[in-house]
Amino acid sequence: MDANAQNKLLPEVENFLSNGPLRAMIGGQQVESSNGNTFETHDPGSGEKLAEIFNMQTEDVNHAVDTATETFKGSGWAKLPQNERSVHMHRLADAVEKHKAVFDQLESLDCGKVLVQAEMDIQNFIDTMRYYGDLALHVQRRTVLPAKGHEAFTVRLPWGPCGFIIPWNFPFLLAGWGIGPAMAAGNTCVIKPAEDSPLSTLYLAHIARDAGIPDGVINVIPGLGEVTGAALAGNPNLKRMSFTGSPEIGREIASKCGANLVPIKCELGGKGAAVVCDDVDIPDTAQKLVEAITFHTGQVCCDATRWLIQKNIYDSFVSECVDRMQKIHIGYQLDESTQMGPVVNQKQKERVLGYLERGVKEGAELVLEGGKAEVPSRNGHYVKPALLAGSLDNVAACEEIFGPVAYLAPYETDEQAIEMTNNTDYGLGNSVWSSNLERAHGVAEQMVAGNSWINGHNLVVHGVPYAGIGKSGMGGGVLSIETLLDYWRPLTVLRPL
Ligand code: NAI
Ligand code: MG
């Protein structure tokens, strides 16, 4: 591990990392892969190995799903009175809170996230456990129906073992969005974390027992997508599947689930637009959009990556943005002065640089050059923020880059801006920026996506459904009651009188 990083690590973090190869957690037991196969996770800011981890094989994955099934049937978790299960959700939140500094460092180290942003993600997980624990108490699970000549009612019951395949960009936050509603509803979980960032979820598996969660409710099976992920996606005994990641893999997993008739929820990529009207406070809006595109180095699925700017303020707005982006301090994720850390791996760095090159080749203007960034004495995967401009047919304007790169285009009328926003297969999050709220609402409600934000971007709040449509996903509604309801199966009971 990088010597500079090591100086700053908590003893618990060092201990955890030095106990490799790290094992899966199945039914409360630490388990090695059946064939002994392992993989490594790295520090994106230094390129150095953090830990070796067992790569779970198909039979190991099947064992995890079988264990989750037995736990569902036999542990009493599914049948606990809701108030008792909700107490466990709070205890899990408390346990993560108690070890929060450890989670913060593991998350920052493993996926290259700036420490303050990792702190926000871990807090979000805690809030999610508490939110769903509380919400589940207030859902009426038995509904009496007026039926002629019959006693009739519906009841909501947990499904059984549920699968979760998680990406590397928000590893712990998204694990929470997945298992929070599933567990609160009484299901059991099998989590496949991303190979680039499995550490925080593996640590969760270690502390779950302290929180009183029965063994086998949270099972964590680390491994590669094409091995462990593929086996989980194809397991016919799962009752529900949840996937967050790229549309390509989403399609593949959804096909497998389709063949097994396992219901799946997909949260995929995005190509969000920000419509900047000519009545905005230019410095304030520029600042907020620059913060959005550099947040987690642009590796955010709902980011604003197409900035549509009204023509009469285009030049002054763009120059404000360029000025701010040039001043962003790029550095190692655990350094306090760092505003933007590395991207997750070499492949992602090449992807970002490749899109800049292809965009320019197709005729885009390079408004802010971007490219590779150097951080003294760190051999990590650093890139500079970049701005491209030109035709919206350009590859860099159409495809998800997943880096600190925004594509700029001017517009004249609001109708034009709406058309440009909606001219994409993606449909996750767009924003409109205006000091005239009536105008902003008019634009926001015509945007075709799961989320329209006004005078803000990347806004996620517990209690408000967050979802994508089209190439951005299906079956969403996370962070709200909609997802909780998904994790109960409806049963109708009918008796002739
Ligand atoms: P990915 O979609 O390959 O990985 C996401 C998860 O799926 C990981 O846990 C991975 O192990 C698993 N996986 C991979 N192949 C699998 C398979 N055949 N069967 C089952 N599970 C599998 O994403 P990747 O390659 O890490 O990133 C590629 C691009 O995807 C990014 O550059 C970005 O554009 C997009 N992406 C979008 C995310 C989002 O939040 N919407 C998150 C991560 C990536
Ligand atoms: Mg890593």
Image: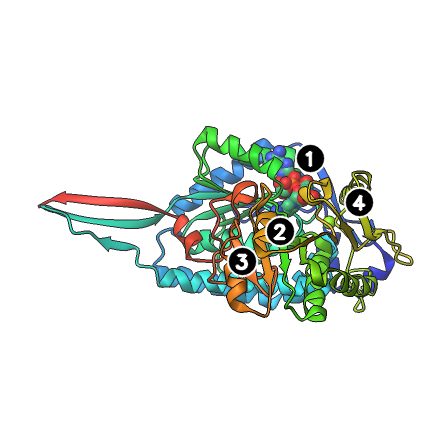
Left or right: residue 217 versus residue 198 is left
Left or right: residue 395 versus residue 239 is right
Is disc 3 in contact with disc 2, using a CB cutoff of under 8 Å? no
Q: Where does label 2 land, which residue?
A: 272
Mark 1, mark 3: which one is toward the viewer?
3
Q: Where does label 3 land, which residue?
A: 443
Out of 424 and 111, give the one closest to the viewer. Answer: 424
Q: Amino acid at mark 4?
A: Leu
Out of 27 and 198, give the one closest to the viewer. Answer: 198
Identified at 35% across, 63% down, the residue is: 138
Q: Amino acid at mark 2?
A: Gly
User: Of callouts 3 and 4, which one flags the residue occurring earlier in the amino acid sequence?
Assistant: 4
Mark 3, mark 2: which one is toward the viewer?
3
Q: Amino acid at mark 1?
A: Gly
Identified at 86% across, 54% down, the residue is: 373
Identified at 26% across, 54% down, the residue is: 142
**Label 1 crowd (10 A; few <14 / some 14-19 / many >=20):** few
Label drawn at residue 356: 4
Determine whether the residue tagged by mark 3 lies in a helix, strand or loop: helix
